[in-house]
Amino acid sequence: MKYYSTNKKSPLVDFKEATINGQAPDKGLYFPGTIPVIDHDVIANIEQYSNEEIAFRIIAPYVGESMDDDKLMQIVKETISFPIPLVQVTESVFSLELFHGPTLAFKDIGARFMSRCLGHFVKNNDKKVTVLVATSGDTGGAVANGFYNVEGIEVVILYPSGKVSPVQEKQLTTPGKNIHALEIEGNFDDCQRMVKEAFMDDELKKKRFLTSANSINVARWLPQQFYYFFAYKQWTDKSNPPIISVPSGNFGNICAGILASQSGLPVKHFIAACNANDIVTRYLQTERLEARDAVVTLSNAMDVGNPSNFIRILEIFHHQFPELKNKLSSYSITDEETIHTISEAYKQHSYTLDPHGAVGYLALKRYLEKHPDSKGIFLETAHPVKFPDAVEQQTGRSIELPPSVKDIMKRKKISTVMKPEYAALKDYLMTSP
Ligand SMILES: *Cc1c(COP(=O)(O)O)cnc(C)c1O
């Protein structure tokens, strides 16, 4: 498999090079040259295949010659070593719970797969690789956990001081070893700006090889297809395929789902569930994609004003607006509606939503009101315990910490406090770790 850049001004690369580079040199995103078609037998008899087998068959064509089958199978097994259940919430609504991984975020899947691939690819490098990433919350924990102790890789995570939840902060400041947390005295935009500057600094890049671990990396983006197949495996009414609603921010997750459906996975329709950051909701109404500054919401992992993966969705549909509109709808949900939805789902269905899942749930319900013969799935992308304030207030009940989190909450936070200035970051990266 060869990957081209969406800006079309970079050489074609294989999976290994795309993973190591992250972004193409022309600043475009890597995109697979062809979209593989999944063997029809796998879809028709999906219950008879193990999750490992399904995942391996989906990802193998994308990895191609970059890795041998045994190694890839080992990585696949480690990536999906936790349950991903489909839970019925109402008569027509099901929750795909993606939060049973080590950091309670769906990002665990992509981060675990990517870290193991990158670790394998740089194993015999004499130059160490530094993964540099800014986080508003969930990315940091998933990346820290995925890359912990991976040889040849140092991870530097920038997070805004006081602006991530206590569980999230512990997840990225307690691992130690090759994971380094920089606590920035500023906001998420400051963190992101500092990281961007580092990627443009030739002097720094001479000193150390930098790569990113966000969802533009193909090794993080592509394995997100797995759980759409696992959802279908658990879907009982195969004659009536599901509508799938995805809480979306940078649009990597939903783009993986759409890619899976282009490969042959039966999905009737996709819904991009957005919070007040409604760039794509507007695009589907006006055909104009207008980036804006992100606004802060309760579902903060989706506070994105310029969704970087949306270009890949356009690429899947060959930039044909009618085809895209046929497969994708979008709703923008306010914080007030999010709060109300958390409360209602708990009272009426005894189901505890987190704010991101609540956006997905309500967007799905809106669509189903107009399509009463359909049923659907929303992706529950984070564990409610990560957002205790909003959730406990609405359900009136405190959420039990899962054992893995209880343990982490007892550990000591270690971070390097830093001014929100690039000079400080550069100084740090030139001299340590
Ligand atoms: C990252 C994240 C999202 C958004 O996913 P994208 O792939 O960026 O669209 C949604 N919910 C949670 C909890 C997240 O951490």
Image (cartoon, rainbow, N blue to C red):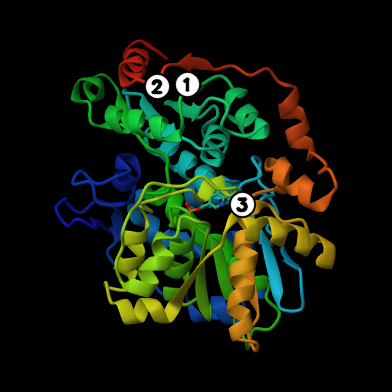
Identity of the amino acid at label 1? Glu
Image location of residue 100, percent across then percent down: 69, 49
Quadrant in which the C terminus is drawn: top left
Residue type (three-letter) at the residue carrying disc 3? Ile
Q: Is residue 123 visible?
A: no
- Comparing marks 2 and 3, which lies closer to the viewer? 2
- For badge 2, the amino acid type reads Pro
Q: Residues within 10 Å of mark 3 (few under 14, many from 20)?
A: many
- Residue under numbered circle 1: 185
Horizontal relation, residue 81 to residue 117: left or right: right
Q: Name the quadrant containing residue 167.
A: top right
Q: Is residue 172 left or right of residue 30?
A: right
State whether residue 120 is above or below residue 409. Answer: below
Q: CA distance from mark 2 to mark 3?
A: 37 Å
**Farthest-out residue, left:** 9
Q: Element type at marker 3? A: loop
- Disc 2 designates what residue? 420
Helix or strand or loop: what does disc 1 sit on? loop
Residue at image position (18%, 47%) is 26
N-terminal label among 2 and 3: 3
The alpha-carbon separation of the residues under discs 3 and 1 comes to 36 Å
What residue is shown with label 3? Answer: 80
Pointer 3 or 1: first along the chain: 3
Q: Residues within 10 Å of mark 2 (few under 14, many from 20)?
A: many
